[in-house]
Every structure is written in C-alpha cells, then in structure tokens.
Image: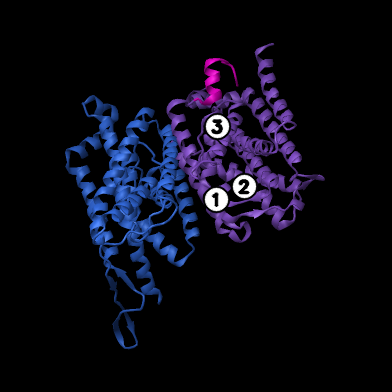
C-alpha cells in the first residue's frame, strides 16, 4: 500500500468503525458518542484555523452559537422546518465568521486572540440582551414535533446517531481533503512562516480569510446540528467556555492533525464524564489538562504519534 | 430624586468602581508591560483576594476593623505568593511564549476557580466594613426663591466608600513611586525596555518576572479586599473585573501605567453612570465592542504611544 492509500484507509476506517459501533454500544455510550461526534465536528472546524493556519481564536463560540441560534430561532419564531433552518444556521455562521475575519485579521498574535474573545463576548451578551426571543441563560427547548427532518424523527436515538455520524463524516472528509490540497498546504506554510509565503507570491490575507470562513462555517454547522439533535438552544453555548472547549479538545488530540479533534473530544468528554461523578468542580480537570498539555505535550496525543511513529500523518 | 442628584450619586458609585478597577488594571498592565504576558487568570487572583479576606476576617473575631486590616495585609501577600509560585512552576517553563502562556493561564483560571468552589463553596459571603458611617450629601440649585441648599432623600455615601477611593489613590501613588524612584523599579523598567540587554547587564530577569507577576496579582487582591465589604466574596466574582481590566488596559495603551489609570477612571465612571441610567448588559456589549474595535484600529490604545 502506498503512503497515501494507507492514510486514506486509516481515516475511512475510523468512519466505518464509528458507523458499526452503533449496533453494539449500550444505550448510554451510544448517546454519548452521538454527542461526541457533533462536538468533534466543532473541533474539526476549530482545528482548520488553529491547527493548520496557526491562528488561535478565543471566539469560536460565536460561530457555534450563530449556527445554533440561526437554526433555533427560525424554527421557534418563524415556523421553519429543520432543513431550511439548518441552512439558515450554517449561512449565519459563514456570515458572522466572514465579518469577524475582516476585522480580526487586521491584527496578529495576542491582539487577534483578544479581538476574537471580545467579539464573542459581545455576541454572548447580545444573546442575553434579547432574552425576550432567546430566553437567555435558561434557553429554549425545540419540541419533538419540530425536529422531523424529511420524515425522520431526529429525537430518536438511532436516527440521531446516524445524523451525527453523517455530519462528522462530511466535516472529517472535507478536512482531510482540504489539508492535502494545495490550498491546505499553503495554510500550513502560512502557519510556519507567513512572511516567506507572502514573498513567494501567495495572497496570505485571502488564504487566512478563507480558512476562517471555512472554520466558522463548520463550527456553525456543528452548533446548528447540536441544537436540532438534542433539542435545546441556550446562552451557555455562546459563553467563553464554549470558545475554550474546542481549543482544549484540539490541543489534547493534536493540533494540525485530522484525527486529533476527534481523539481529543472523545478523551476529554469521558474524562469530564467520569470526574463529574466524583465532584461538581469538574472544570478543574479541564484546567489541569490545559496547563499540563501546554507544559508537557504541546503536540497532543495524535501529534505525539506523528512525531514518533507515523511521520506523514496529515 | 431629580436628575442632578441622581447623576452625582451615579458618579460617586462609579468612582468607587474606578478606584478598585484602577488597582486591578494596573496589576494586569504591569504584568503585560514588563513580561509581555496576557494573564487571563488575573480575575481569579482578584477573587482569591476577596475569598482570603473573608477567611481572615472570619477567623480573627473581635472588632470588624481588626479582621479587615489583617486581611488587607495578608490577602495580597498570600495571593502574591501563589502567583510567584505559578510563575516559577508554569510560566517560566513555557519561556513566556505569549500564545502558550495565554492557554496556560486559562487553565490556571479554571484550577483556581474550581478549587475555590470545592473548598469555599458556592455561597456569596460578606466581610464587615471597618467603619461605615452614612454621610448625607448636600445638593444646591437655583429655585424660585434663589439659591437653595438642601439634603435630598437618598443622596448619600458612606465613609467607607470614600476611604476606598483614598486608599486606591495612595496605593497607585506607591506603585508609581516604586517604578520611578526605586532600584527594583529601575530593574523592572530595564527588563521591560529590552529583556536580552537587561540579561546581558546581569539583571536577574527571571526573578524580576516572578516579582512582577506577584505584585500584579497582589494589586488585584488588594482591590478585591477593598471592595469585599461593598460586594460579597463569591467564587465566580473574577469574571467581570477581568473583562473590565482588559478593557481598561487596552484603551489605556498596553503596558502604560498613566494611561491605564486614566482609562480606569473613564471606564469606571462611565460604567457607573451608564449602568444607572441604561441596561448594564447593553453597557457591557458596547464596552466589549469598543475594545475589539480599538484593538483593530488603534492597537496602541487610545492614550498610548506606539511601542514595539
């Protein structure tokens, strides 16, 4: 098998495994894995900007929430059916990420992080401010009758798992294809040395802009599906915490690897799931993980595998 | 109350906010200026100051003033020590890389916050003020009978609030004197100007960094001790001061102390006044947007001059 075929076999193998798992998993883990796949899609979106382009955003909750509320509000207040509502959510994410990119890409480094943080915070506060429609922190439930997509009831566990799997597969394959394409390789080059890429004649600004919109759109798709599949939209999904989570997942799994976001999300989800049985202060685990990762394993789990064993893992 | 007295009241409340905010923000600004580290955990040092103040005041007993003044000394020292420890064990090992330190201080934020939740609990607890005399304030106006001088109902402040403003001003003066007039201040400024050159001249840069990180955290803790008789100590209380301190430091020019104090006055007063007359959420939305836009178009801050 050639190197390229082995890589494709490995990644498609994960998708096949995830598809097969639904027939053997017990109900509790079955539900968890559906949730993990949607959240991993969010991490896949985040990874395109952070892992491959090298731009650390602290405001991705804005895109996640744009998708979630773009979908949820149109169903709740305008009587949309799920299919157009999902499209509205994803478009909202594309628009918001494009607008923020136009502003934030004028800055670099620490300023970029703070600008994205501030605009996401403004977005969160806006959700609270329009509490009349969004119900603020309390959030609103999307009724079962409103969650039927093309005759498929998405509140049913099997259908939900399949929808989550389909969403994750699409984002995963797009991400794998993207980073192996010339466009993706230019993004990696920008991460490594933007000055040199510019000197080689590439328009780095347009590449970064496109990366941020793709990343924001995938994040919004994850937000829209999360709201639809689990029937709830609330302001906590727009808070700073939900900007930190994808960073944590990607760092843990391995920034700049296609498999990393999924591995990181899976690992952290079960870590928090297990520890919340012991203490209510489960975010302590998130904090410890962040500090220990930055100190001892900045490459993450898959990153370590790539460094030691499989050098050309994308 | 009429508009005039109401405005005066809002200004006074705003001045208290501004005084505490100035302390917190100068701490953040000092750390950013000298170390080039954006400390996301700064709000948690503030929270720790308030929580430790509660513990100290709770254990001291006797006259409330006794516990309060003990807290005023102990809380900043303890928090400063914790910060120095965090600097040595975490930040130093990251070689003060700007992006990695942000991620690490986010982790630190959760660790401090959640450990406080596990030990101190989710309740909000008050600390009694050492003195708290109510002072009615006069208001005057040109009425039909000419110049009038009276005490409107509800227009008052307390001796403690005035003392907070005074204490904050004194501490800020002290920080300025330390930076401008002492040897350790000189070492800090040298490190800020050029780290490598300072190292070449034999300045123990790493010890200066640890000290600066400690002083920055201690200033936040001091501000929290001052505010805790007015607000209560709670494990989530660090979020708002962090956001406001960020706003102040960015508007005031990153790393510039006079700019930071000016901006703290401006933000504290306008926050007090806007919150009284408009929705606090709207005030916060406008403030966060302002910070974002200032960073995009005037990265050196509104009052700052451009530095490298």
Q: Which numbered tag is attached to residue A123?
A: 1
Give SS at disc 1: helix
Instruction: Identify the residue shown where x is 75% and y is 31%.
Output: A23
Q: Which residue is mark 3?
A: A250
Question: What quarter of the picture does the N terminus of chain A occupy?
Answer: top right
| Rendered colour, chain A | purple
Q: Quadrant of residue A150?
A: top right
Q: Does label 3 or label 2 sit earlier along the sequence?
A: 2
Asked whether disc 1 touches disc 3, contact meaning CB atoms under 8 Å apart, the reply is: no
Which chain hosts label 2? A
Circle nearer the N terminus (1, 3) = 1
Above or below — where is B272 with respect to A261? below
Badge 3 density bin: few <14, some 14–19, many ≥20, Cα 10 Å: many
Q: Give the spatial CA distance, label 3 vs label 2.
A: 21 Å
Under circle 3, the secondary element is helix
In magenta segment, residue A7: no
């Amino acid at each position: 098998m050639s190197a390229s075929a082995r890589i494709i076999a490995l990644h498609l193998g994960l998708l096949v495994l995830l598809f097969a798992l639904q027939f053997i998993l017990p109900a509790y883990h079955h539900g968890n894995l559906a949730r993990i796949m949607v959240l991993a899609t969010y991490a896949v979106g985040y990874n395109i900007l952070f892992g491959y382009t090298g731009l650390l955003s602290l405001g991705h909750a804005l895109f996640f929430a744009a998708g979630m509320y773009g979908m949820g509000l149109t169903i709740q207040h305008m009587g949309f059916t799920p299919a157009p509502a999902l499209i509205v959510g994803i478009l909202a994410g594309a628009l918001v990420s494009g607008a923020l990119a136009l502003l934030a890409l004028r800055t670099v480094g620490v300023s970029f992080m703070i600008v994205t943080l501030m605009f996401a915070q403004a977005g969160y506060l806006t959700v609270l401010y329009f509490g009349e429609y969004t119900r603020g922190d309390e959030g609103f439930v999307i009724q079962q009758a409103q969650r039927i997509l093309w005759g498929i009831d998405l509140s049913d566990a099997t259908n939900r798992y399949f929808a989550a799997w389909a969403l994750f597969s699409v984002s995963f394959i797009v991400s794998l294809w993207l980073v192996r394409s010339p466009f993706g390789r230019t993004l990696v080059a920008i991460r490594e040395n933007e000055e040199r890429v510019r000197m080689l004649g590439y328009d780095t600004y347009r590449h970064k802009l496109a990366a941020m919109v793709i990343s924001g759109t995938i994040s919004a798709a994850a937000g829209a599906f999360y709201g639809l599949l689990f029937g709830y939209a609330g302001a906590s999904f727009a808070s700073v915490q939900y900007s930190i989570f994808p960073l944590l997942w990607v760092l843990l799994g391995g920034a700049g690897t296609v498999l990393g976001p999924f591995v990181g999300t899976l690992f952290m989800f079960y870590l928090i799931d297990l520890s919340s049985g012991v203490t209510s202060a489960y975010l302590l685990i998130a904090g410890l993980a962040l500090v220990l990762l930055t100190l001892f394993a900045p490459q993450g789990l898959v990153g370590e595998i790539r460094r030691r064993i499989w050098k050309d893992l994308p | 109350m009429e508009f005039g007295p109401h405005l005066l009241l809002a200004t006074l409340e705003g001045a208290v906010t501004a005084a505490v905010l100035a302390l917190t923000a100068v701490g953040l600004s000092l750390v950013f200026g000298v170390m080039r580290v954006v400390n996301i955990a700064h709000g948690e040092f503030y929270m720790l100051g308030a929580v430790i103040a509660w513990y100290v005041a709770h254990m001291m007993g006797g006259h409330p003033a006794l516990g309060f003044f003990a807290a005023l000394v102990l809380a900043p020292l303890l928090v400063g020590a914790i910060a120095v420890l965090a600097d040595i064990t975490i930040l130093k090992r990251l070689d003060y890389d700007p992006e990695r330190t942000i991620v690490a201080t986010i982790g630190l934020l959760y660790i401090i916050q959640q450990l406080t939740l596990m030990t101190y609990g989710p309740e909000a607890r008050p600390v009694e003020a050492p003195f708290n005399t109510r002072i009615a304030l006069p208001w005057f106006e040109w009425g039909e009978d000419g110049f009038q001088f009276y005490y409107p109902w509800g227009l008052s402040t307390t001796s403690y609030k005035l003392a907070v403003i005074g204490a904050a001003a004194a501490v800020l003066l002290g920080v300025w004197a330390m930076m401008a007039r002492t040897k350790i201040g000189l070492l800090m400024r040298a490190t800020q100007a050029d780290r490598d050159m300072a190292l070449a001249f034999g300045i123990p840069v790493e010890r200066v960094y640890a000290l600066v990180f400690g002083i920055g955290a201690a200033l936040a803790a001091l501000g929290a001790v001052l505010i805790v008789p007015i607000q209560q100590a709670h494990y989530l209380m660090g979020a708002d001061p962090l956001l406001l301190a960020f706003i102040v430091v960015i508007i005031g020019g990153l790393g510039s102390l006079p700019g930071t104090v000016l901006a703290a006055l401006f933000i504290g007063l306008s926050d007090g006044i806007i919150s009284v007359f408009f929705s606090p959420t709207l005030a916060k939305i406008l403030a966060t947007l302002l910070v974002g836009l200032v960073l995009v178009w005037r990265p050196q801050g509104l009052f700052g001059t451009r530095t490298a």
